[in-house]
Image: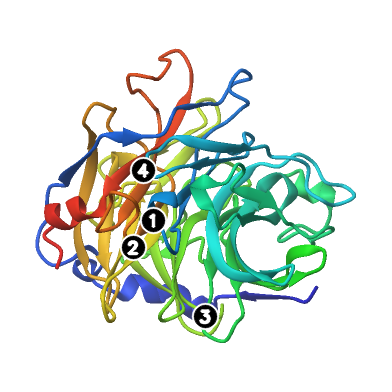
């Protein structure tokens, strides 16, 4: 398998800091977050032995081409595998995180998921759920039954055997856990399909071209790009986001603008990046920064937490994102109109940005529960502009942790996913 690796030149590391804060955060002062409501959530998942060590993380939406009521939400549950939900948020299928189909394969840990449309699987155009597997440092693939919610088992694994590791030279290195993490699918015109994958505990992003054959779906032509991990500040110092020893400021949430081939990537303790594809073909730009960007912290090994060296030190951050910046997805409107949505895990809100131009901030919102619990600590999210069942103007699905709704066990570590009418977000933020 061909591999290429590139790193950003030192001069490029200065470019994100040259943009004035007003551009990154939007014109005018900070605005309070709008509020939308949800009354629909999936059954809670529990990260304990009785719950199968299931911890919800990232969703993807598959819209049935003929009957949107048969659409699916596919969500990762880490060591608990995958869950498949209906448009009513009922569980349709639980897919175990089985050992990867390789000689040294181990049971998986599924982190992020996206959908690839129309891959040639056994001579049939097939939609496929594409999943990052942290414990095997690779991508796994699951064919979606065209019957959708009417199928007995909507997902079937079709991963080709003996796929190479994405970031690790050998199995011993995989065990160090700096492996496949965030994931998005990119299908440019011309027939090729790619996956964009981030590396846990590192600033590296990879792309891989998906392949199909008699043994299943695989990938080749893996290329890497090292994103910045330290940042020069206007006061003459260099800021390195505080992490535990041996860990770099990682990226997780990623989404690709299918119209322009632009990658939007959330670096959890840094902010939201815009990265041209293919990797290395243009200059990445940091379009928004987390609120404590530039605040020098120190790591305390006893508490395993970071704390400011000087609590009174100024921040060079934006107004919208409170670390961690997590899930990312794109809502497409007519023409070139659209929005980038980012989950701000640190304050339980979501930032919305214009998809065009300089990605102007359009505001933030939170999700309150109506008969269910409020959405907190959101990690992954997914949004569709197509009608999905009763969600006629589109559907937003977001991770929720901790799950504290009426059906949750207060003594267990619960997670889940909540469904939101996209029209409610449009109205709350007065989007056009």
On the image, which quarter does residue 202 sit in? bottom right
* Contact? badges 4 and 3 (CB < 8 Å): no
Question: Can residue 226 be seen in this snapshot?
Answer: no
Which residue bears the numbered disc 3?
188
Q: Earlier in the sequence, mark 4 or mark 2?
A: 4
Q: Is residue 336 above or below residue 181?
A: below
Structural distance between the alpha carbons of marks 4 and 2: 26 Å
Instruction: Return the disc, 1 or 3, that comes first in the chain's sequence.
Output: 1
Within 10 Å of disc 3 (Cα), the crowding (few <14, some 14-19, many 20+) is some
Which quarter of the picture shows residue 271?
bottom left
Residue nearest the viewer, comparing 200 with 352: 352
Residue pictured at 66% horizontal, 41% vertical: 109
Mark 3 / mark 2, whichever is N-terminal: 3
Residue 334: x %, y % from top left: 26, 77
**Label at residue 285:** none
To which residue does mark 2 refer? 386
Q: Position of residue 405 (x, y in %)?
A: 33, 23
Residue found at x 38% / y 50%:
69
Could you tell me how far apart the alpha carbons at marks 1 and 3 are, in whole angstroms? 25 Å
Q: Which residue matches tag 4? A: 345
Q: Are marks 1 and 2 in contact (CB under 8 Å)?
A: yes
Residue at label 1?
68
Q: Which marked residue is nearer to the observer: mark 3 or mark 2?
A: 2
Q: Position of residue 241 (x, y in %)?
A: 45, 51
Q: Earlier in the sequence, mark 1 or mark 2?
A: 1
Residue at 60% x, 67% y is: 195
What is the C-alpha distance between the residues marked 1 and 4?
A: 30 Å
Q: Position of residue 312 (x, y in %)?
A: 25, 42
């Amino acid at each position: 398998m061909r591999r290429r690796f590139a790193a950003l030149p030192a001069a490029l590391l200065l470019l994100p800091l040259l943009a004035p804060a007003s551009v990154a955060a939007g014109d005018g002062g900070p605005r309070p977050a709008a509020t939308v409501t949800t009354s629909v959530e999936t059954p809670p998942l529990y990260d304990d032995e009785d719950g199968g060590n299931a911890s919800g993380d990232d969703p993807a939406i598959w819209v049935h081409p003929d009957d949107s009521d048969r659409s699916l939400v596919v969500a990762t549950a880490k060591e608990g595998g995958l869950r498949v939900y209906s448009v009513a948020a009922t569980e349709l299928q639980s897919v175990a995180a089985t050992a990867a189909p390789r000689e040294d394969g181990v049971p998986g840990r599924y982190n992020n998921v996206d959908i690839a449309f129309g891959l040639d699987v056994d001579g049939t155009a097939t939609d496929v759920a594409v999943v990052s597997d942290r414990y095997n440092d690779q991508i796994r693939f699951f064919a979606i039954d065209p019957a959708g919610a009417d199928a007995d088992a909507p997902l079937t694994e079709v991963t080709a055997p003996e796929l190479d590791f994405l970031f690790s030279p050998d199995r011993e290195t995989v065990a160090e856990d700096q492996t496949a993490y965030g994931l998005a699918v990119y299908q440019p015109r011309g027939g090729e399909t790619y996956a964009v994958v981030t590396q846990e505990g590192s600033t590296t992003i990879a792309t891989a071209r998906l392949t199909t054959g008699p043994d299943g779906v695989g990938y080749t032509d893996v290329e890497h790009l090292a994103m910045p991990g330290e940042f020069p500040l206007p006061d003459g110092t260099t800021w390195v986001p505080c992490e535990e020893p041996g860990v770099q400021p990682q990226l997780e949430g990623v989404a690709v603008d299918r119209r322009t081939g632009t990658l939007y990537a959330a670096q959890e303790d840094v902010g939201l990046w815009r990265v041209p594809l293919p990797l290395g073909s243009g200059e990445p730009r940091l379009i928004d920064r987390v609120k404590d960007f530039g605040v020098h912290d120190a790591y305390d090994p006893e508490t395993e937490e970071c704390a400011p060296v000087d609590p009174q030190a100024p921040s060079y951050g934006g107004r919208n994102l409170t670390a961690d910046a997590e899930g990312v997805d794109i809502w497409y409107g007519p023409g070139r109109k659209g929005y980038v949505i980012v989950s701000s895990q640190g304050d339980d809100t979501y930032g919305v940005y214009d998809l065009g131009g300089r990605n102007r901030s359009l505001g933030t919102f939170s999700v309150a529960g109506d008969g269910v619990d409020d959405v907190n600590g959101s990690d992954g999210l997914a949004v569709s502009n197509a009608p999905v069942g009763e969600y006629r103007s589109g559907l937003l699905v977001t991770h929720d942790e901790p799950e504290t709704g009426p059906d949750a066990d207060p003594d267990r570590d619960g997670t889940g996913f909540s469904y939101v009418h996209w029209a409610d977000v449009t109205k709350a933020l007065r989007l056009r």
